[in-house]
Image (cartoon, grey):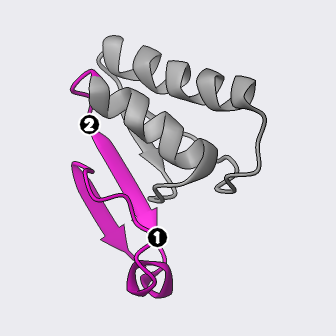
């Protein structure tokens, strides 16, 4: 199953939310599901991706090209689609 997560990409979030996003990513990967999300490396978006990647999960990012040009994309994704 593919699970889509949309969350904040700001680094200005409470650490508890960051930890929860990371744990969500871990749960998605451990359940053998794929994560589809915004493709960024920062904030809650980056945390959920990091959690899934830590456990070998498939992580698919969908990122606007201008954000990739600004190097906001996550470098370790399974697949990154630029739109």
Between the C-alphas of marks 2 and 1, the distance is 19 Å
Residue drawn 35% across the image and 24% down it: 33
Of labels 2 and 1, the one closer to you: 1
Tell me: residue 70, above or below residue 62: below
Q: Are marks 2 and 1 in contact (CB under 8 Å)?
A: no
Residue 55: percent from left, percent from top = 27, 21
Label 1: few (<14), some or many (≥20) within 10 Å?
some
Foreground pick, 16 / 7 = 16
Q: Quadrant of residue 14?
A: top right
Mark yes or no: residue 1 visible.
no
Label at residue 80: none
Which label's residue is closer to the chain start, 2 or 1? 2
Q: Is residue 17 left or right of residue 77?
A: right
Tell me: residue 46, above or below residue 40: above
* Label 2 SS: loop
Quarter of the C terminus within the rendering: bottom left
Mark yes or no: residue 11 visible.
yes
User: Which residues are drawn in magenta?
Assistant: 55-83
Pointer 2: what residue?
A: 58
* Label 1 SS: loop
Foreground pick, 18 / 57 = 18
Residue 7: percent from left, percent from top = 67, 46
Pointer 1: what residue?
A: 72
Q: Quadrant of residue 58?
A: top left
Residue 75: percent from left, percent from top = 28, 59
Residue drawn 33% across the image and 68% down it: 81
Residue drawn 25% across the image and 51% down it: 76
Residue 25: percent from left, percent from top = 46, 27
Asked if the magenta segment contains residue 82, the reply would be yes
């Amino acid at each position: 199953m593919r699970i889509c997560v949309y969350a904040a990409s700001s680094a200005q979030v409470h650490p508890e939310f960051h930890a929860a996003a990371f744990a969500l990513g871990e749960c998605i990967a451990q359940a053998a599901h794929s994560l589809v999300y915004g493709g960024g490396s920062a904030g809650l978006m980056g945390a959920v991706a990091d959690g899934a990647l830590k456990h070998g999960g498939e992580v698919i990012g969908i990122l606007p090209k201008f954000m990739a040009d600004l190097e906001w994309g996550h470098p370790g994704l399974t697949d990154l689609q630029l739109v």
